[in-house]
Amino acid sequence: MSYELIALLMFSTMMLLLLTGKRVFGAIGFVAVIASLLLWGDGGSEVAFNAAMKLMKWYPLLTLPMFVYMGYMLSESGLAEDLYRMFHVWMGPLHGGLAIGTIGLMVAVSAMNGLSVAGMAIGASIALPELLRRGYDKIMVTGVIQAGSSLGILIPPSVVLVLYGMIARQPVGQLWLAGVFPGLMMATLFVLYIVIRCRLNPALGPALPEEERLQISWREKLALLQAGIAPLFIFFSMTGLFLMGVTSLVESSAVGAAAATVAALFKRRLTAKVMEETLRKTLGITCMFMWIILAALCFGAVFDGLGAVKAIETFFVDRLDLGPWQILIMMQLSFIVMGMFLDDTAMLVIVAPLYIPLVGALGFDLIWYGVLYTITCQIAYMTPPFGYNLFLMRAMAPPEVSLRDIYVSVTPFVLVMVLALVLVMVFPQLALWLPQWHYAR
């Protein structure tokens, strides 16, 4: 049996196991270990062992539990609710102001969490009921929350970019910096869409009634600004110190986790229940990612040994006679198709052993491609009929928001994301300028 056929058999077996509903890391790791034993006998057992040792020695992986802990501490202690109240009061007088404030909340949550699920949970539980009560169009605001929550996997500290960096063997610090401008650009495009849409049709996003605005004094408004102090303090202590060169990547994650704990303590919300829930959820998420990375490293090692990447490169370049950009666009389209059925980590683990070496062989920058991958995951999350975020929203939304409403709501935001993806592809410096500038210092 040829190595190409073995690689195809491995890939198809893995997909079949995933379709049965098995755990992602279990399906991928099982196929990798069995294939290595059948190919190389007893020596094949060292493939998984070496992958585990490589994982344990990867020092930047310590950032993963730190940032997950930080995000859950902010969520469980209620600091995110305070932040939304601030946006609610200050942005409410504008048409569509609460929707714009929701995007601002999502950017802040993304900068303190790194997971889209956390942003979705906060948006659906805090922002959505308030927006609907204020008479906002249910289709528009449902799309706002889904689009805003997707920023969590692009704006640092992105857990997905940590996973990509581990598998692609790229510096996580550079990947995070590469995601800053594209993430903020996408958030700005969302805000512009909301402003234009509400100006054309003010009924979609009514402003706060004047009598309600008059009930809130300037003293109260200024007091509410204190809600933004804690997130700014945490963000500066984490990202600011890292950019200034005071702390390393791992040290900045520890500083961020400590700052979130201090903020919760200062607000007198650091109870035993909050700490227990934060630690329990942090442990669960961290262990899940550790197993996924381990399975991906093992699977990738077997693929490298088979020479499958070289075979795929030969197939695309020599047999199909495709250019580098054509191959890259085909890769992005395949991510969108897979995103209808899988989450971002599963997609990355499945295709990383094939795509990442091929991207490097085609002459593209792997830091830049990490941003492209992440934006494409955001698009895939919101692509009907089975986008990951669509069903998360359906599970969290009130009964008056139907599945059809959710499908319709994402269409304009998906188009905005496609525009952002095209801009980053055409102008790579949008992603590469900040890491190049910082590390050149």
Image (cartoon, rainbow, N blue to C red):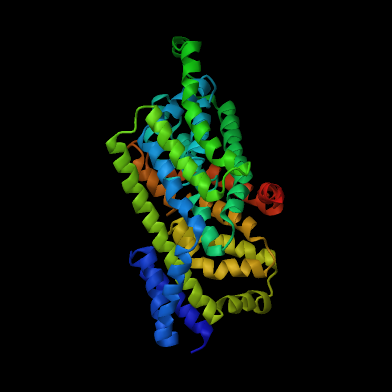
Residue sitting nearer the eye, 121 or 70: 70
Residue name at image x 61 percent, y 38 percent? 189
Would you place residue 32 above or below residue 424 in this image? below
Residue sitting nearer the eye, 55 or 190: 55
Residue 360, x across and y down, in percent: 65, 67
Query: In the displayed structure, does residue 45 sit left or right of residue 380?
Result: left
Asked if one can make out residue 82 in the rendered structure from this viewpoint, the answer is: yes
Residue farthest to the bottom, as pictured: 1
Residue sitting nearer the eye, 35 or 242: 242
Query: In the displayed structure, does residue 304 sit left or right of residue 280?
Result: right
Would you place residue 357 above or below residue 67 in this image? below
Residue farthest to the front, as pictured: 246
Would you place residue 271 above or below residue 1 in this image? above
Residue name at image x 62 percent, y 45 percent? 182
- Quadrant hosting residue 31: bottom left
Residue 319, x across and y down, in percent: 65, 79
Residue name at image x 43 percent, y 28 percent? 131
Residue 397, x across and y down, in percent: 36, 39
Q: How many marks?
A: 0
Would you place residue 333 above or below residue 71 in this image? below
Asked if one can make out residue 205 in the rendered structure from this viewpoint, the answer is: no
Query: In the displayed structure, does residue 129 sit left or right of residue 161?
Result: left
Residue 336, x across and y down, in percent: 52, 58
